[in-house]
Image: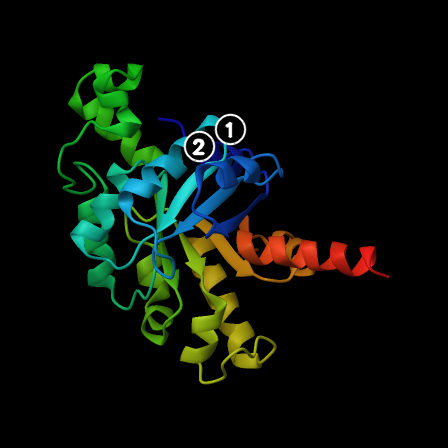
Amino acid sequence: MENIFLKKVRRGEHCLGTFSFLTTENAVEALSYTGMDFIIIDAEHGTVEAQTVAGLVRAAKLHDLTPFVRIKDCSRPGVLNMLEAGAHGLVIPQIRTVDEVRNIISYAKYFPIGMRGVSVGINGGYGYEPFASHGLQGYFDVCNRETLIFPQCETKECLDNIETIAAVNGIDGIFIGPYDLSVALGKPGVFDSVEFRSAVERIYTAVKAAGKIAIMYTVDPDEVQSYFKRGFQAVTLGTDIKLMISQLRDIVLRAKQ
């Protein structure tokens, strides 16, 4: 198991991805030809289930497009189902407490970081990947390193606890959900307020202090570079559906002029 996204981040590269709602394998394969570094298959707001995710993950991995999944909730089945489907990382929505995060780590990471149930499945080549044939602890160590866990900071409670949450052992970074965060701050969709900008700065500072990965979400392509320059290692740009519609609408308008 090799997490190419993680290798790029460690080399200091900026990574760009999008949410995947076009839940067919050829759509994911097509995204791999765009130059994007990762996708986030959305099981929170989308309708995709683990069996479909397994096929999407395979399509992404064939073309070095790192597949993450945003799961439905922070329950043990919610975490394990998508890891067993082959996800190279999870984005966990609606986090509120430090205890929730610690529980997620216990479900998602193997001993000694967590207590994930032993399963040598898709990402271990069902036991036939070379790294899976050198003892169980060696297998655990690779999976723990290459499987990334990103709590999503989008609630007031998570923001209030962000320094502690970002520092939890086993957390690999924080994903900022700006829309729900703006709602939590009492100003839905207002991203230029002092409160919102201060919240983003606080989250970024906490993640940086913890030595973790900071991921921002935006729907505006013009904002991507500003987040990279600020220090974010990764940015998620919109969704595949919205990007497709936007580009096609522009093409149609120009074609009909």
Is the residue marked by circle 2 packed among few (<14), some (14-19), or many (20+) residues within 10 Å? many
Residue furthest to the bottom: 186
Q: Which is more toward the observer, 72 or 21? A: 21
The furthest residue to the front: 256
Q: Which of the two discs, 2 and 1, sits closer to the camera?
A: 2
Relative to 254, is 134 on the left or the right?
Answer: left
Q: Between residues 223 and 211, which one lies in front from this camera angle? A: 223
Where is residue 87 drawn, in percent x and y?
34, 39
Instruction: Identify whether 162 is placed above or below 185.
Output: above
What's the CA distance linking mark 2 and mark 1?
7 Å
Residue kind at label 1, given as amino acid type? His
Seen from the viewer's position, the closer of residues 203 and 176 is 176
The reply to whether residue 34 is visible in this rendering is yes
Residue at image mark 2:
59
Report the quarter where the C terminus lies.
bottom right
Mark 1 lies on a secondary structure that is loop
Number of the label disc, if any, that sits on residue 63: 1
Cβ atoms under marks 2 and 1 closer than 8 Å: yes
Q: Residue at x 28, y 68 (%)?
A: 96
- What residue type is disc 2 on? Ala
Which residue does the image show at 54% across and 51% down from the upper left?
A: 240
Residue 230 visible in rendering? no
